[in-house]
Image: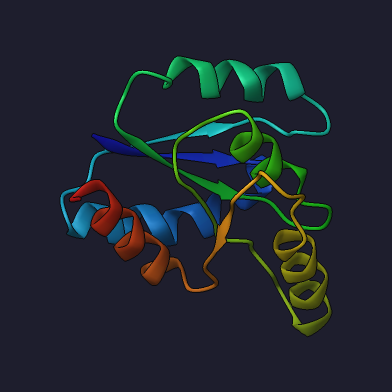
Amino acid sequence: MKAVLILGSEVDQAHAEKITGALDAQKIPHETLVASAHKKTREVLEIVEKFANEKVVFITIAGRSNALSGVVAANSSKPVLACPPFKDKDDYLVNIHSTLQMPSGTPVLTILDPGNCAEAAARILNL
């Protein structure tokens, strides 16, 4: 039982640490990996496959054109929580819109606050 964070880029590490800090406070084990859905699609699919038989929640952290969350959700039966990073209002609008616009059959739950994302992961894992 753990949260698996997948970052689209190393640049997202500071945002991920806000989530992992909250997970640590709740004693929820976690693992952080970096793999861009655009640049390393095969690696993303290998990560999803690696955890296919484990009780995990995927937390995806990607901005701009957020293919990461959709690729993970489309190729896994595990819950996917997207917590997109943003640095300003313009970045916020782009990142939120790309995260909310997922194709049918790819359920991604979007949570903006890193602390709430960790709390949601903990509640899902405790079901």
- In the current view of this chain or complex, which residue is farthest to the bottom? 89
Horizontal side of residue 115 vs 39, given as left or right? left
Q: Residue at the location (59% across, 53% down)?
A: 108
- Colouring rule applied to residues: rainbow
Relative image position of residue 9 (x, y in whole percent):
69, 41
Horizontal side of residue 29 vs 106, given as left or right? left
Q: Which of the two residues, 87 or 99, is positioned nearer the viewer here?
A: 99
Q: Residue at the location (77% across, 61% down)?
A: 101
Numbered label tally: 0
Relative image position of residue 127 (x, y in whole percent):
20, 50
Q: Which of the two residues, 55 or 103, is positioned nearer the viewer here?
A: 103
Q: Quadrant of residue 29?
A: top left
Q: Residue at the location (23% across, 52% down)?
A: 24
**Compared to 15, does 55 lie above or below?**
above
**Compared to 14, does 92 lie above or below?**
below
Q: Which of the two residues, 47 or 18, is positioned nearer the viewer here?
A: 47
Relative image position of residue 59 (x, y in whole percent):
49, 47
Horizontal side of residue 98 vs 85, given as left or right? right
Horizontal side of residue 90 vs 4, given as left or right? right
Q: Dividing the image into 4 quarters, which one contains the N terminus?
A: top left
Q: Residue at the location (83% across, 53% down)?
A: 65
